[in-house]
Image (cartoon, rainbow, N blue to C red):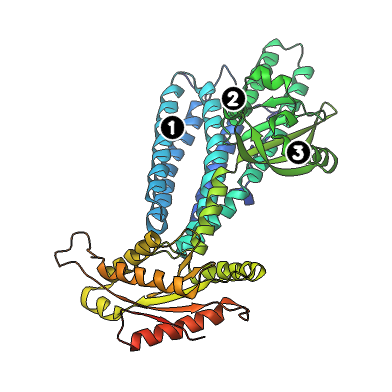
Amino acid sequence: MSIPSNRQPPSSAQTIDLFVWGPLFKTDIPELDAQHQRLLNMVNQLNQMLIETEQWDPRPQEFFGVVDELRAYIQIHFGTEEGLMKAFSFDPAREQSHRQVHRSFVRQMERLTMEAHVNPTETIAHLLGFLSKWLINHIVGVDVPMARGLKLMQAGESPKAALAAEKNAMRHTGKALLLAVDHLYDTLTLRAQDLLSVKYRLDEEVMRRKKTEVKLLQQNQVLITIIKSLPGIFYMIDPAGKFRQVNPLLGSVTGFSQVELEQMSVQDLFVPEDVPLVQQKLKEGFESGHTWVEARLRLKSGDAIPYHFTGARTELDGKAYLLGLGTDMTRHYELEMELTHLSQTDALTGLFNLRHFLALSNKELARAKRFDRLPALLMFDVDHFKSVNDAFGHQRGDEVLKRIGEVCRRHLRAVDILGRIGGEEFAILMPETSTRSAWEAAERLRRSIAAEQITLEGATEAPLQVTISIGVAKVLVSDQHIDSALQRADQAMYHAKHGGRNRVSVSDS
């Protein structure tokens, strides 16, 4: 392929950045941000190259220069990112998935490089669309939220705190993606307007007019590619709530065909209970310019999925539309449930922790007083537990505590509230239970634990047997909080210890 040596860029070429570096791309990890900004600059460089390239006179040396820079970038950036994940991440499966996405990026780059030898101009457009998708989908949608968690892990925070930070960042992903698409939409609209102006001015120059039309198609193709590749539901609706443009994901998620969606209004896609809120938010979006709503998306199958929708008003040809993005909230709610579970349970035994045990017990105490059906309280710990840790190690000690929790769950009622309230201390609130019945339940539990043979997987030692000492106390009407009953049960347990251990003692109060 010949390359003219005297070719100059068209004098009408104008520099218009497709992306502008800003907060929605930032991870606050300086090394990653510098690399992401470098990729953004290369995307803008490709965009300008597409503007200046003559269809019949491409400049492949510039394109392959960018390709070489991209290859060098990939080696540095993917190595940096995977190194950070390996050092600070707590989810090996996610690390593996992230690496696979990186490998897919490399394969796509190699394919586009081969195609460039056949048709450089078309390949520039394809590569621009591919990298734009990567910037929006992967960096904004995946890297930025994940970096919040990694940054906390770097600072020494727990996986739980990192998970919470990532969840919080994910909440804003939909809004960030919408801002990116909104900027792209504005940029490409201005590009189209500029090219149309050129078309009208050069109407007599057929070849130039053809070039302008080709460029319009290229720009539209880039926008369509980006919209189709978004990880959320993209939509554009009019004030009547009718869809004017959607990406294929809306049909894939809901099960409705394109024809069915064209005949439906936005309200038809939500469960009846959420429709009034959706209507209110639509009105708010057209009036104030921005809106958001969390509502359940109705599927053709009859099921529903929680979604977070953002919307921004825009104008085309003097008409107002609402441009927005919807993000599936299922994973976010799962994370919330997981965090709630972590905050309420003991990580070792799976029983309620002290804080949640007290909260539930105080709630039961208030209910019991209303109906004059007071509960009983058991408190126990493992006899000579320190000697178990000293003789067999903490791993065997942990196994003892987990096994005790399992035995308790087998022998107690569903209504009983069971918690690990200290190192080897446990407490059980038994609703609507007399002192006699509580004592009988405590005796059954004591005998069951004493008979339990505890083995550690892979261990060669004989099974370990432990005993517990239990204190029983009746909850009184005068108790303002469960703490008073816990103190009496603790005193009764103290008497059981000093009475020889492996026994049940009942509080005198």
Report the label total.
Answer: 3
Cβ atoms at labels 1 and 3 below 8 Å apart:
no
Q: Position of residue 265 (x, y in %)?
A: 75, 26
The residue shown at (53%, 26%) is: 126
Labels 1 and 2: the sequence-earlier one: 1
Which structural element holds mark 2? loop
Q: Quadrant of residue 294?
A: top right
Q: List x then y, in percent, for residue 443.
A: 36, 72
Residue 258 location, quadrant: top right
* Amino acid, disc 2: Gly
Give residue 45's position: percent from left, percent from top.
Answer: 57, 37
**Amino acid, disc 3:** Val
> How far apart are labels 1 and 2 at the CA level?
33 Å
What is the number of the mark on residue 278? 3
| Disc 3 secondary structure class | helix
- The reply to whether residue 30 is visible in this rendering is no
* Numbered circle sitting on residue 219: none
Amino acid, disc 1? Met
Q: Quadrant of the N terminus?
A: top left
Answer whether labels 2 and 3 touch (C-beta < 8 Å).
Answer: no
Task: Pick the residue in front: 106 or 100.
Answer: 100
- Give the camera-side residue of 434 and 276: 434
Return the residue at label 1: 109
Q: Position of residue 366 (x, y in %)?
A: 64, 70
Judging depth in this view, the residue of 29 and 422 nearest the camera is 422
Q: Is residue 258 left or right of residue 76?
A: right
C-alpha span from label 1 to label 3 = 42 Å
Badge 2: few (under 14), some or many (20 or more) residues near its Cα, within 10 Å? some
Mark 1, residues whose alpha carbon is within 10 Å: few (<14), some, or many (≥20)? some
* Location of mark 2 (residue): 255
Residue ID at (50%, 79%): 486
Q: Is residue 210 visible?
A: yes
